[in-house]
Image: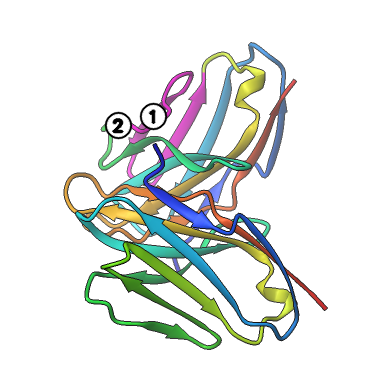
Amino acid sequence: EDKVVQSPLSLVVHEGDTVTLNCSYEVTNFRSLLWYKQEKKAPTFLFMLTSSGIEKKSGRLSSILDKKELSSILNITATQTGDSAIYLCALAWQTGANNLFFGTGTRLTVIP
Amino acid sequence: DVKVTQSSRYLVKRTGEKVFLECVQDMDHENMFWYRQDPGLGLRLIYFSYDVKMKEKGDIPEGYSVSREKKERFSLILESASTNQTSMYLCASSFGGGVKQYFGPGTRLTVL
């Protein structure tokens, strides 16, 4: 049973569009939720969110956690071809080892 | 900057061969992880280690073993490679109490 579900699975947009990627989860006892961007190689860290609900921003990217909806969104405004990547969402559990449980990812393609 | 390196970017092996995948990190991280990434399945945790000579099974340990003789190095071993182990293998590391993981570039393994 999937604990972290990302939607959509894939998305194709034109440069300049705004996109919203979704990450839904089924558990409440987690420490934080992380977003990563994966181009052709290593996933690179984007944001870490906690249940405080504070929005995180970095340039054209922003993300927020919605405790009530058990979900997080990643927004990208004014998309560029360099935003083409797989976007991964992961949960870090509250207790135990410092493992991350990843969703399946959303493949974003930005066409000129 | 944290650097996580993996011994090979691409590897082709034959069924039944013993395969070693090496991962080295340069930030004195306590935790190290091995994942495999397959289309539609996301990143799945194979094994992790939170200290030298310590190892814990992840979600899909069958057919794999690991070794951590030194803090900076974590090896994934396929004792007898099979075609269903064809995949992208990602190594990651993190600080002892931290959840943010730093990833290596990945090894794309093909088993013929």
Give A53 or A47, whichever is nearer the viewer: A53
Decide if residue B23 is on the left or right side of residue B96: right
On residue A57, the disc is none
| Residue B74 percent across, percent down from the top left | 42, 38
| Residue depicted at x 23% and y 45% | A97
Q: Chain of mark 1?
A: B
Decide if residue B69 is on the left or right side of residue A31: right
Question: Which amino acid type corresponds to the residue marked 1 in the rendered image?
Answer: Ser
| Residue B81 percent across, percent down from the top left | 60, 18
Displayed quadrant of residue A40: bottom right
Q: Is residue A79 above or below residue B98?
A: below
Q: Which residue is mark 2?
A: B55
On residue B67, the disc is 1
Q: Is residue A9 above or below residue B87?
A: below
Q: Residue furthest front?
A: A69
Question: Which amino acid type corresponds to the residue marked 2 in the rendered image?
Answer: Lys
Label 1 near label 2: C-beta < 8 Å? yes
From the viewer's perspective, is the residue at label 2 or at label 1 nearer?
2
Q: Quadrant of the N terminus of chain B?
A: bottom left
Residue B77 on the magenta span: yes
Residue A88 on the magenta span: no
| Residue depicted at x 46% and y 34% | B75
Range of magenta residues: B56-78
Q: Chain of mark 2?
A: B
| Residue depicted at x 46% and y 39% | B44
Displayed quadrant of residue A16: bottom right
